[in-house]
Amino acid sequence: MSGKKERNKERREKRLQEISLLRTIPYSDHQRWWSKETIAVVTGANRGIGFEIAKQLAGHGLTVILTSRDTSVGNEAAKVIQEMGFNLDVHRLDILDSESISAFIDWIKHKYGGVDILVSNAGVNYNLGYDNSVEFARRVIETNYYGTKNMIKAMIPVMRPSAVGARIVNVSSRLGRLNGRRNRIQDANLREKLTNLETLSEELIDRTVSFFLQQVEDETWQSGGWPQTFTDYSVSKLAVNAYTRLLAKELSDRPQGEKIYVNCYCPGWVKTAMTGWQGNIPPEVAADTGVWLALLSDQAITGKFFAERREINF
């Protein structure tokens, strides 16, 4: 291993140790703006990072709604957390199915009246190791970007007004960074348009992912200047990151008492089924920044990208 890689590994391990320590420090009374009446929804929470986020939020005393595409799997996951004595409910949700989203929203309104926190974790990735297939690119984009976006849009009307504001946390990835050194869109003009909040729009994001999918269909994507690592996943998370910034801007005009703060974060390369258990970060550590963002008492933070409780550039 080169000296630079060794130093980077040491820094990462040191930071993970710091996060493990931070997780042992309880929130003080003045930091705890939430109670068991605070409702948090976590999508794709039957396993991996989503399960850990749900468990940790419930452990902090919130009421958590664990969602899963598979009802029986969701029920089994929920039982594990419920047996710890935490407040946790469970409901089926498929973010690719508009009827499933509508049924979930109706259930939320009827049973809880609304929600305070949404953690958008549901997502897919079909590449492992050094693979870079785009065979399932359309499903990756539809799930990770369109599914996430459609779920957020459906949830915003049921997010409850409060003095501290509602929160949306999108689980994303550094692979979707616009200006990463190694894995980024090569078209500098498109990067600039997606970076600049004055030119960023939902239409631009949609057009970008549609163009990528068209090139996949035409088998020209490899010469299209797209990210070279896990290309379909990277493009989907680039879209999520861009939409997070756009949504934060759109929601910033809400009056005090009706604020919604939206951020995204990269959990890292996590030892879960999505990475074929090859990751180097345990799920409980990977979940930490998402939980931290959901519970932040600093209301001014919105439209930002985080990793390991530190802000990073989009």
Image (cartoon, rainbow, N blue to C red):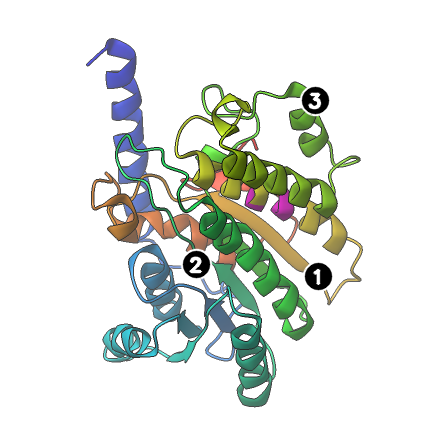
- Residue tagged by mark 1? 259
Residue extending furthest toward the top: 3
Q: Is residue 288 visible?
A: yes
Residue at 57% across, 64% down: 151
Q: Which mark is residue 189?
A: 3
Span shown in magenta: 240-245
- Indicate whether 254 appears above or below 266: below
- Indicate whether 228 appears above or below 270: above
Tell which of 309 and 80 is nearer to you.
Answer: 80
Q: Which mark is residue 122?
A: 2
Query: Is disc 3 placed on a helix, strand or loop?
Result: helix
Looking at the picture, which amino acid does disc 1 mark?
Answer: Lys
Magenta stretch, overall SS: helix
Name the front one of labels 3 and 1. Answer: 3
Mark 3–mark 2 Cα distance, whole angstroms, equals 31 Å
Quadrant of the image containing the N terminus: top left
Mark 3–mark 1 Cα distance, whole angstroms, equals 33 Å
Query: Is disc 2 placed on a helix, strand or loop?
Result: loop
Q: Mark 3 vs mark 1: which is more N-terminal? A: 3
Mark 1–mark 2 Cα distance, whole angstroms, equals 24 Å
Q: Tally the marks.
A: 3
Query: Is disc 1 placed on a helix, strand or loop?
Result: loop
Residue at 32% across, 74% down: 74
Name the front one of labels 1 and 2. Answer: 2
Looking at the picture, which amino acid does disc 3 mark?
Answer: Asn
Left or right position of 239 against 10 = right
- Indicate whether 3 appears above or below 118: above
